Amino acid sequence: MSTTEKPRGTKIEKMTEAALAAPLKRRSFLKALGITAAAVSAPIGTATAVTDKLKDSNFWETYFQKHYKEMSAEDKAQVFARIERETKTTYGVDVHVGDQQPIPGVKFAYALNLSRCNGSRRCVEACVIENNQSRHEPQIQYIKVLEMPRGTLDPERGDLYYEGEAVPKNDKFYLPVQCNHCDNPPCTKVCPVEATWKEADGIVVVDYDWCIGCRYCQAACPYEARHFNFAKPNIPAEEINPVQGYLSNRIRPKGVMEKCTFCLHRTRNGQNPACHDACPTGARKFGNILDPESELSKILKEKRVFVLKEELNTLPQFFYYFD
C-alpha cells in the first residue's frame, strides 16, 4: 500500500462504493445516512441511529422506489399502501392515498379579484386544513396574504404580519400570493433529480419521495412559493384530512420541499381548490383556461389582468385583476 492510499474494507466504505456504483438518479449516500443536501455539514449522529435507519424496511422501500412517472399501476399500489400504513402507525389515522390524473383537454388557472379580497385569510386557513400542512414547529402555509398600500403593486412593500381582526382597512388592499404554476417554471429546471415537473393540466407537482431536499427550487422560485419541511409535520390526528393524493396533500416527510398543487386531489375530481371555496367575498375564480365558456376565460378576455413579476418571463398562470 502506498503512503497516499487509505485503509479500505470497512462496512461504511463498502456501502459507499456500492452506492456510488449503483445506477441511481438520486439520493447520495449521505441521504442514506439521514442527511439532506441542505444540512450536509450537520453531524451524522450516533452509529446506532444510522444502523437503525438502515434496518428500517420502510426507509429502503422509499430509497429504491422508482420515480412516480416510471411506476406501474402495481408499483403505485404498493407505494400508496406503504404511505397509508406509515400514516396509521405514526398518527393512528386511516387515510386513503389516491392517484388523480390530469383531465384531457383541461389546463387549470386562477384569477383573483383584488377589489374583493378583504384580507381575512380564510383562504390560508382552508389551505392548511385541506393540505395537511404542519401547524407549528414548523408552521407551513402555502398562501401568504400581503397588506398593500394603495397605489403600489410591489409585493416587497407588503406587510405579511398585519393584524387580521379589523380588515379590510380603508387605505389598504390585500394581495394573496401562492404558487403561480408557471408555464415556464424556473423551479423545475434546477431540480437535479427531476423530483418536480409541470403536468399536462398545468399543475406543477413534487414527488415527495424522490425529492432530496437540496432547496434549489426554493432559491429559483421568484414568488417564495416553495417551502422546506425542516421537521416532522406537526398535525393533530383529529385534524388530518384522510382524503389524500400522492402528488398533493398526503403528509410530507421531513426534509423535502412542498407547495400548492391547486388541490389536485380535488380539482381533478371536479371540485374547486379549498381556498376558492373558503373565500367569503367570491374574489377567487378557478377554472379551465382552455374552455372559452368558463368564467375564468371570460375574466381573462374582459378584464385588465396582470401577473406578478411579468418581466421574468415565467408565464404565471395565476392572474390578478381589479373591478
Image (tube, helix red, strand yellow):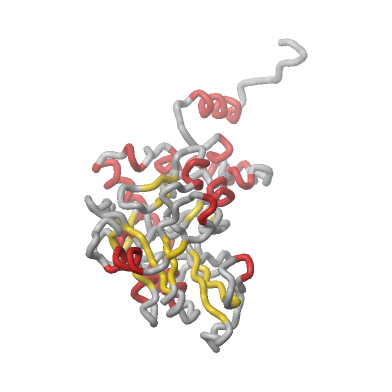
- Position above or below: 115 against 61: below
Position of residue 285 measured from the top left corner of the image (x, y, whole percent): 34, 70
Residue 17 quadrant: top right
Residue 240 at least partly seen = no
- Position above or below: 59 against 299: above
Quadrant the N terminus occupies: top right
Q: Residue extending furthest right?
A: 3
In this picture, residue 35 sits left or right of residue 277: right
Of residues 171 and 185, which is closer to you in this image? Answer: 171
Of residues 141 and 135, which is closer to you in this image? Answer: 141
In this picture, residue 64 sits left or right of residue 200: right
Position of residue 21 measured from the top left corner of the image (x, y, whole percent): 50, 23
Position of residue 43 measured from the top left corner of the image (x, y, whole percent): 68, 45
- Position above or below: 50 against 267: above
Residue ID at (51%, 58%): 225
Quadrant the C terminus occupies: bottom left
